[in-house]
Image (cartoon, rainbow, N blue to C red):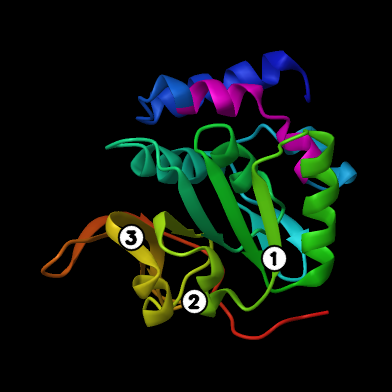
């Protein structure tokens, strides 16, 4: 179930569900998702489902990873991307194969360590990991062409909006943990932050603080 055949089936399923960008489908096909989950769950790595990774967190459903990545690439491949919520590192690995550079923030230190080990195995040189409260972003490298949240805030933190470059876009699930959540895309223009709703989703909540 960790074979190339399983990866091909997953890519085919995502195409059936509406993912059209061939670059995204190829990266999903090529990325060893089984490395990002517990060994006991490796046989389920290429199912189109979210899986637990510990600490109350999950590795996102492949369709959601593909959908968010496709949305970020809709206009042009961004050169500098901020990811809030490294988690397993899978979304960062997919992004890093399609954009210039990824800076990924994780508040839970053990998850960050695990992600670093797997990403090192993949020899992806354009990912920088930071252990920090993602609500504050990472202003040292701002502004960003794109910002992607892999956990859901009730409202998008202002600090993240301010770190978005002019013309850049932010993708995030927004809503209550136990209620309706919506995937939104926000584009920064000279006049305003323009919001577009992309449909219902379900993510773990974006929490404050750091965990050692």
Residue located at (17% from left, 61% from top): 189
Task: Say which of marks 2 and 3 sits in front.
Answer: 3
Q: Which mark is residue 165?
A: 3
Residue at which label 1 appears: 130
* Residue 174 badge: none
Q: Residue at x 57, y 49 (%)?
A: 102
Q: Nearer the viewer, residue 41 or 208?
A: 208
Task: Return the disc, 2 or 3, that comes first in the chain's sequence.
Answer: 3
The residue depicted at 77 percent of the width and 36 percent of the height is 34
**Dominant secondary structure, magenta:** helix
The residues bearing labels 1 and 2 have C-alpha atoms spaced at a distance of: 25 Å
Q: Earlier in the sequence, mark 1 or mark 3?
A: 1
User: Which region shows up in magenta?
Assistant: 24-36
- Secondary element under disc 3, as helix, strand or loop, is strand
Give residue 193's position: percent from left, percent from top: 20, 68
State the image quarter where residue 55 is shown. bottom right
Q: Which residue is mark 2?
A: 177
Q: Quadrant of the N terminus?
A: top right
């Amino acid at each position: 179930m960790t074979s190339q055949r399983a990866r091909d089936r997953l890519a085919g399923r995502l195409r059936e569900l509406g993912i059209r960008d061939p670059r995204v489908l190829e990266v999903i096909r090529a990325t060893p998702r089984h490395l990002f989950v517990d060994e006991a769950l490796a046989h389920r790595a290429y199912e189109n489902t979210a899986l637990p990774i510990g600490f109350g967190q999950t590795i996102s459903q492949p369709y959601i990873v593909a959908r968010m990545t496709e949305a970020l690439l809709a206009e042009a491949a961004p050169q500098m991307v901020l990811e809030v919520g490294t988690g397993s590192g899978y979304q960062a690995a997919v992004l890093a194969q399609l954009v210039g550079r990824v800076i990924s923030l994780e508040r839970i230190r053990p998850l960050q360590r695990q992600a670093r080990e797997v990403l090192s195995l993949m020899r992806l040189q354009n990912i920088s990991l930071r252990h920090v409260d993602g609500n504050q972003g990472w202003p040292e490298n701002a502004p960003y062409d794109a910002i992607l949240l892999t956990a859901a805030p009730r409202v998008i933190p202002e600090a993240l909006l301010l770190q978005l470059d002019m013309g850049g876009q932010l993708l995030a699930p927004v809503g209550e943990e136990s209620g309706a959540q919506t995937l939104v895309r926000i584009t920064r223009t000279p006049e305003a932050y323009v919001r577009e709703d992309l449909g219902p989703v379900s993510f773990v909540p974006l929490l404050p603080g750091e965990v050692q």
